[in-house]
Image (cartoon, rainbow, N blue to C red):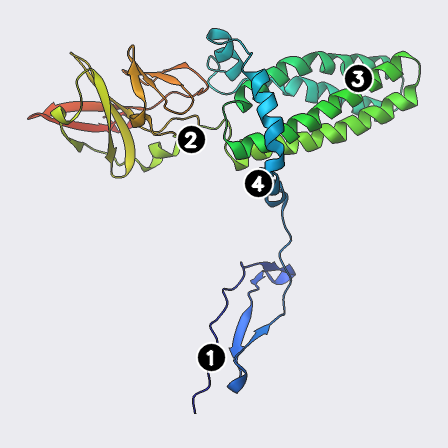
Amino acid sequence: MVSRISPLPRPSCTHRNGDHGKRVVKAWVRSGSSGVVPDRSGSRPTMRFGERVRKIEREDRLDPLISRVKKIAERLPTGTVRDVLHGVQFGHPLHSIMVHLPIGTWTSAVLLDLLPGKNERSAHTLVNIGLLATLPAAVSGLADWSQQHERQQRVGVVHAMSNGMGALLFGASSLARANGHKSWGKALALAGMGTVGFGGALGGHITYYRAGGANRADHFIDVLPEGWHDLGPLDHYPQEGMGGGDVDGVPVVVTRTEDTVSVLLGSCPHMGAPLSEGELVQGCVRCPWHGSEFRADDGTVVHGPATASLESLETSIVDGRLWVRPRMSVG
C-alpha cells in the first residue's frame, strides 16, 4: 500500500541564527502514513523598518490627502523656477541639499541644550535659523513629490506630516525660549528632533528604497556591451522623429534630423519611463510620463523633473545600417 504524500509547502526565507551564522529554514520530513510534519525549530525573521514602511505604500486612505496636496503643487511656478526647485542646474535634487540646513541647525541646538554651559542664546538662534530654512526645503520637496509614483507619494505625505509636526515643535520651542521657559524650550526641541528624525527615515525610504531622485538609467551604463552594435537599417527610424531600439537588451532611443542621427539611452533617469514612447520637441526628447526634456544631440537635461542627463552613444552608418557603441569604449 502506498501512503499519500501531501504537497510540500514553500519554505520561508532564510534567516541567520545567532552566533552560528547558519541558515535556518523550515525542514519538512516524511512520517510513514502521517504525511508531512513541519519542524518548527528556528525563529521568525523580524520585520525591518523598510518592510513596515511598505505598508504605508499600500494605504489608499491617504489618497484623498494626496489629491489635495497635488492641487497645491500645481500652483508652483513652471519653467526655470520649477527646474531650480527640482535641481536641474545642480545635477541632482535640490531638496537633498536644502534639508541639511534645518536638520543641521536643529541637531546643533539640541546638542547645545544637552551640553553644560550657558548655551541658551546660541541654541535659540539655531532653532530660529532652522525654522527659516524649512520653507525652501519643503517647497523643493513638494516639487519632487508631485512628480513621483503613488507608492512614493503615500510615504511622502506621511514624511511631510512628520516633518511639519517637528517644525511646529521647534516653533513652540522658540516661543518658550523667548518667554523665558528654558526647560520647556529644551524639551520641545528634543521632541521635535525625534519627530524630524522619523520623518527623515521616511525620506530615506523614498530616496534609497524606492529610488526617488536617483538616476534610474545609470545602471544601463554598466551592462551596455562594448564594441559596435547593429541597430538595423537607418530607414527604419523616422526622419525628423525618433524611434526605439535596444543593444543586447539595453533600451536606446534614436533621433533623426536632416543632417544628424543621435542615439541615447532609452530610459528616463527620473522614473525609468520608456523614452521611445515620448516625442521629439524642438530638438529635445520629451519623456512621456513627466515631461522631462533632454537635448537629442548629447542627452543634456534641459527641463526637469529629471536632473541627470542621458548617456549618448557614438554612431556610425555603414551601408545604410546604423551602428552604435558606448563612448566610454572609444580608444
Mark closer to the chain start, 1 or 4: 1
Provide the secondary structure element on which disc 1 rests.
loop
- Residue at 48% across, 71% down: 8
Provide the secondary structure element on which disc 4 rests.
loop
Q: Nearer the viewer, residue 121 or 212?
A: 212
Mark closer to the chain start, 1 or 2: 1
Question: Residue 216's mark?
Answer: 2
Type of the residue with mark 2: Arg
Q: Nearer the viewer, residue 62 or 176?
A: 62
Question: Residue 211's mark?
Answer: none
Between marks 4 and 3 in the image, the one whose residue lies nearer the viewer? 4
**Is 224 placed left or right of 320 in the picture?**
right
- Residue at 47% across, 79% down: 5
- Residue at 50% across, 32% down: 211
Residue beneath disc 1? 5
Residue 45 against residue 90 in the figure, above or below: below
- Residue 76: x, y in percent? 55, 11
Residue neighbourhood size for the residue with mark 1, other residues' Cα within 10 Å, grouped as few (<14), some (14–19), many (≥20): few
Residues at marks 1 and 2, CA–CA distance in whole angstroms = 47 Å
In contact (CB < 8 Å): disc 1 and disc 4: no
